Amino acid sequence: MGVCSSGMSSPANKNPPRCRSEMEKGTKARKNEANEDAQTKAKEKLWFDKKRSDFGPISSKDKMTLDMLRVVYGAVKEVPKRAKENDRKAANEAGTQLTYGEIDPRGVMMMAKNLSFKDADVLLDIGSGRGRVAVQAFDQYSFSRVIGVEVARERFDLCENAVDCYVKYHKTHNRFAVERLREMPHEYGIPKKDFVIVEATRPVSSVSSEEVSKCTSNSKSTLEFYRSDIGALRELVADAKPTVVLMDMAFPSMPESLASVLNTLPFGTRILTYENLAKKWPESVEFPFSSVDGDRFLTSWETEVGHYFFKWVKKRVSNRKRALCEEDAKELADFGIAPHTEVSSPQQPRKKVATAILQQEA
């Protein structure tokens, strides 16, 4: 029996030399591990602080949006930690999980820069929760359409409360006209209890100088939320032609219904995802995205250095080699990329991959 066996040590020597040596080694290893973790976090914080300083000052228009979010979402309850049984069932049927967190408003501003919101027309937020990201994007940037989709009834109801507060806020502050629509402007057979739609009418003066060219004297845009499994909205998404997609949601494996919806996205659509799509994509469906370097963004669960999101660009899927059409070539030229450019690594910087779509071999 070894010297460390229970009950063998004398009262005068409870920790024999061998035991003390093992304990000291364990303590030292834990201290070294803690020091390494602290050093890593310190380096990450320095890097992220520099990134935030490079971000530049917040404009008066951005500040108005941040003030609005504080008022609107200060009046809306937080998402409960435990979801209701019906919502858990709905999420299970949709193949998703109800783990909840929100992207910080400053994180959304960083995403806007990373995904070029100013060059985008339609935003799709899959797993929109209380709708804070979609409301911020709609208020702060010049999207013609922002669409949020949430499967959980309780979270959708909180989102509806937030939208009502948002409409009241604008009527009080009179920044631009915002009105809730009671009928759908599109026909997709969605029950009234499962959608919330707001229409905004903005004068050019309410849009930043870089965005004026995208607007007429009165620019109309819609903010839409749907309580649904995204798989049931395939036609709506296909017709909307999203330019940018956010997927702050978790799933054990990619549901084929979600993969089918993502397959309808237009060529060149930029996507940020919580999950690594390449690892979760169903084998029965060809993977239609090029990987681009992701980045960290501030979230409710990573408030100092941000959480890493994966970034993708939609590519064309083809079974034969073909030349890019003129429209594709023009889009590539906007990123400084010659048509038919071969991309050797999916981890190259964004501008080297951008919306470059490789010719596919049969």
Image: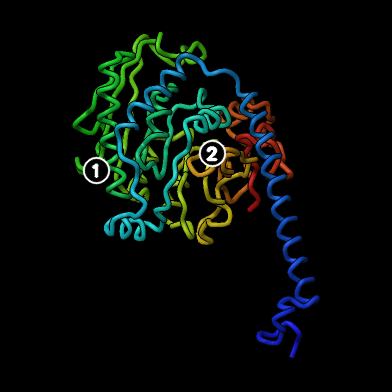
Residue denoted by label 1: 194
Relative vertical location of residue 57 with respect to residue 360 in this rendering, above or below: above
Residue 165 appears anywhere in the view: yes
Q: Position of residue 229 (x, y in %)?
A: 34, 50
Distance between the alpha carbons at the discs numbered 2 and 1: 32 Å
Q: Is 351 placed left or right of 200 in the picture?
A: right
Instruction: Find residue 86 and report its image quarter.
Output: bottom left
Q: Which residue is mark 2?
A: 303
Residue beneath the point at 44% across and 57% down: 256
Dot 1 crowding, Cα within 10 Å, few <14, some 14–19, many 20+: some
Sequence-wise, the earlier of marks 2 and 1 is 1
Q: Tag 1: residue type? A: Asp
Q: Horizontal and vertical percent for residue 258?
A: 43, 51
* Percent coordinates x, y for residue 273 in the rendering: 52, 45
In the image, residue 165 above or below residue 89: above
Whether 196 is drawn above or below 24: the answer is above
Q: Residue 287: which numbered mark, if any?
A: none
Crowding at dot 2, Cα within 10 Å, few <14 / some 14-19 / many 20+, comes out as few
Kind of element beneath mark 2: loop
